[in-house]
Amino acid sequence: MIPRYSRPAMTQIWEPENKFRIWFEIEAHACDAQAELGVIPKEAAKAVWERGAFEIDRIDEIERETKHDVIAFLTNLAEHVGDEARFVHQGMTSSDVLDTCLAVQLTQAADLLLEDVDGLLDAIKRRAFEHKMTPVVGRSHGIHAEPVTFGLKLAGYHAEFQRNRERLVAARKEIATCAISGAVGTFANIDPRVEEHVAAKLGLEPEPVSTQVIPRDRHAMFFATLGVIASSVERLATEIRHMQRTEVREAEEFFSPGQKGSSAMPHKRNPILTENLTGLARIVRSAVTPALENVALWHERDISHSSVERMIGPDATVTLDFALVRMTSVVDKLLVYPDGMQRNLDQLGGLVHSQRVLLALTQAGMSRENAYEAVQRNAMPVWLEGKDFLTLLKADDEVGACLSTAEIEALFDLGHHTKHVDTIFRRVFGEA
């Protein structure tokens, strides 16, 4: 987490102030439930809410001696609450506080990330409709294939991020569980109703079996979901980077007045934002393997997961939050060059229509093998010598024996490739 790639709303989730506030609420809500059950005096629960407070510096000071962060927090809390503090944390273990707090923090982070994804979806949708029928060459293996539209390209990314949104909603639900079950998770010294009360107050669900910790398969799925979203960010970033290459020049990042691209070459307009997003995606994905390795803990628990989560929790969520917002800005301001797209479409003298010619020849009675050979025979001089595909086809006697000049020319209609764009858009965006 560094300020350069951080946004305040997300970083605040991981600040000590928010963490200790959640710890306090967990303990205070647990006291309320204990009081209702008659385990502790109601006056004690009331005192925790009325006098409960904490100081981060004081907690740090105590922890330097105790070497235990939860005990340091409870000691500082007791300094404010007074004698009634002896009823705090009854029947609970440290993981009840730590794991429940992490669940709250991750749900808070997920809520922000969902807002980010929604913003990106809106930007992609707007630009997709703007360029719904803007023709651009499709590429496979980086080589010209057949025509598509730039709107269709963006529609594909919209569908992908819509799936990512659904994944994130599911991951948020899966991570939003509460454990207030005591040592080794048996509820031996605390009533399960305390857990139910705390969970309800914090917007969580009780963890069915928490041993002493919430099972880490939940966390693994959460961070894996963040990794998938980051990969989608990188895929879109990579597409833009390719389209901005000098030899392509179909689209490029917005270049603001006064912006500089190179310290040495004043002409440069580099895709720095999308290159940056590619790097940030790697950081988010780097959290996935440690999260998966955290699943296998010893017996009812160990703390090998703890140091990992203290790092990947903030780093992955803060980085992905920044990346999604940056990508939204890139898409929103993206400079699109339809003329450049058309220029590239025309670059290979009509070869993008080769499949239509192949199919027309087979439908006219030629075997597929002979049709393929005839089309390829006329395509290679275009590829190697820069000749015109349509002209060569018209001059080919074998092709001419099957297709008239008018029929051959009709095969070069760009509209053939865009006739189902509306159908695809309805599938992605609905009837509206």
Image: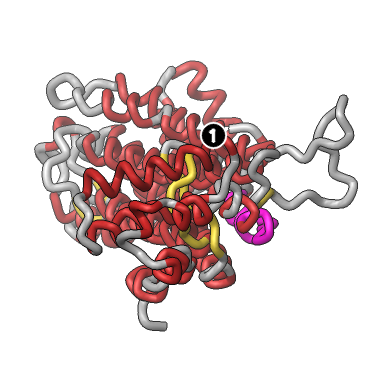
Disc count in the image? 1
| The C terminus - image quarter | bottom left
Name the residue nearer the viewer: 213 or 197: 213
Q: Quadrant of residue 85?
A: top left
Relative image position of residue 2 (x, y in whole percent): 64, 32
Range of magenta residues? 326-341
- Is residue 25 on the magenta stretch? no
- In the picture of the structure, the residue carrying the numbered disc 1 is 384
Q: Quadrant of residue 209?
A: top left
Residue found at x 35% / y 31%: 288
Residue found at x 44% / y 71%: 406
Relative image position of residue 74 (x, y in whole percent): 41, 35
State whether the magenta stretch is mostly helix, strand or loop. helix
Relative image position of residue 12 (x, y in whole percent): 57, 46
Residue 58 sits above or below residue 153 on the image: above
Q: Residues within 10 Å of mark 1 (few under 14, many from 20)?
A: few
